[in-house]
Image: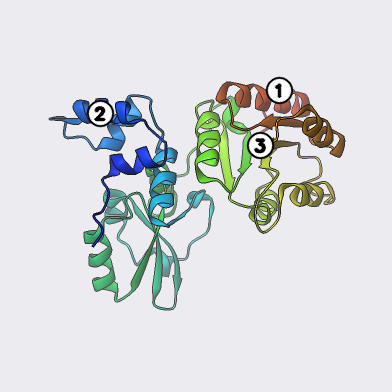
Amino acid sequence: MQKRKRFGEILVDAKVVTEELLSTALEKQRGSGKQLGRILEEMGVVTEQNIAAALARQFGFKTVSNIARASFGNELLGLVDADIASKKFIFPLKLDGGTLYLAMVNPLDIETIDNLSFSRNLRIVPCVTTPSEIQAAVNRHYFKIVDTAPDGDVWWTVLVVDDQDLVRAAAVAALKREGYSLLEAANGADGLRTTLQYKPHLVIADTVMPRMDGYEMFRAIKGNEQIKHIPVIALSSKSSAEEEANLLDMGYFDFIAKPINPVRLVARVKHALRLSYGDTPPKP
C-alpha cells in the first residue's frame, strides 16, 4: 500500500513551495499549535487558494468557489448542522440520489466524512474549497448574514477563467488582495455561463481551455447584447508580439502573457476598469 504523502510534501510536489521554505515553516510550526497551512499563509508564502488547488490536484478532487452566491434549499442545508459546518469548515453543495457533494477545506478529514455518511446514510463526495469560501457560505445561508461592501474597489467584480487550478488561484489571490470581488470558472463554457449570470465588470480568460476555448468564449460574449460591453483580457502562454497583435485585433481589451506576474496583472486590471467605467465605482 502506497504511503500517503504529508501536506508539506504535497505542496512541494505541486511547486507551491520549495523544500527550503517548507523546512522553515515546519520549524515555525513546532510548539505553535497551528496548522502548517496557516503558518505558510502568515509567512506570505502561499494563499488559501494555493492550498486548495494543490490538494485538489494531488488527490483528484474537484474545486468549488463562489458558494455564497449560489442558491440552496432548506432540505439540503438541513443535512449539515450550522455549527458543524462552521466548526469543521464544510458545506453541503448538492444531493444527487444517495450522494451528497460536500465542500470541504480538508477533504482528507475522514472522521467528519464518516460521521456525516453514517448519520445521514449517504455517500459523501468531497470538493475542495477555502476557509473564506466556507465561512461566507455559512454566514449567508445558515446565519443569514449578508456582507455589505465598503467604498472602494470591492465594488468591481472580476471573473477569472483558466483550466489550470494553480494559475487561476494565483490570479484570484493577487486581485483579492486589491479588494476586488472575484468569480472563477475552469473552462470557457462555465466562463460564459458565469458571465451571463453575474455580469462581471471584467473577464480575464485563458485562450486555450477544454469544453470551449477562450476564443470561442470571447466571440460568444461579444455576440451577446447583454454582455458584449464587458471588457475581456486574454491570458496566453504565447508571449510573442504577433500573438498580442492578433488578440488585440480580435477585440480583446488587453493581453497578459503567462506565467502571470501579479504586479502586471493588477496594473492591467486597474487600467481596464478605469478606461471602461471611469474612476467612480458602480453602485451595488
Question: In the figure, residue 115 lies in which quadrant?
Answer: bottom left
Q: Does residue 138 appear anywhere in the picture?
A: no
Looking at this rendering, what residue extends furthest in the right direction? 249
Which residue is located at x 68 percent, y 30 percent?
256
Residue 222 shown left or right of residue 149 in the figure? right
Residue 127, image x, y percentages: 42, 57
Residue at x 39% of width, y 48% of height: 134
Image coordinates of residue 33 in percent, x first then y, are 16, 34
Q: Which type of secondary structure does the marked residue at label 2 adopt?
A: helix
State the image coordinates of residue 34 (x, y, percent, origin top left). Answer: 21, 35
Which comes before the other along the chain, label 3 or label 1?
A: 3
Residue 271 disc label: 1
Residue 174, above or below 96: above
Q: Nearer the viewer, residue 115 or 32?
A: 32
Q: In the visual, does 195 lie left or right of 50?
A: right
Determine whether the residue tagged by mark 1 lies in a helix, strand or loop: helix
Q: Which three-letter amino acid code belongs to the residue tagged 1?
A: His
Dot 2 corresponds to which residue?
Answer: 23
Q: From the image, state whether disc 1 or disc 2 is nearer to you.
A: 2
Mark 3 residue type: Ser
**What is the quadrant of residue 118 in the picture?**
bottom left
The image quadrant where one finds the C terminus is: top right
Instruction: Return the residue nearer the eye: 269 or 10.
Output: 10
Front disc: 3 or 1 = 3
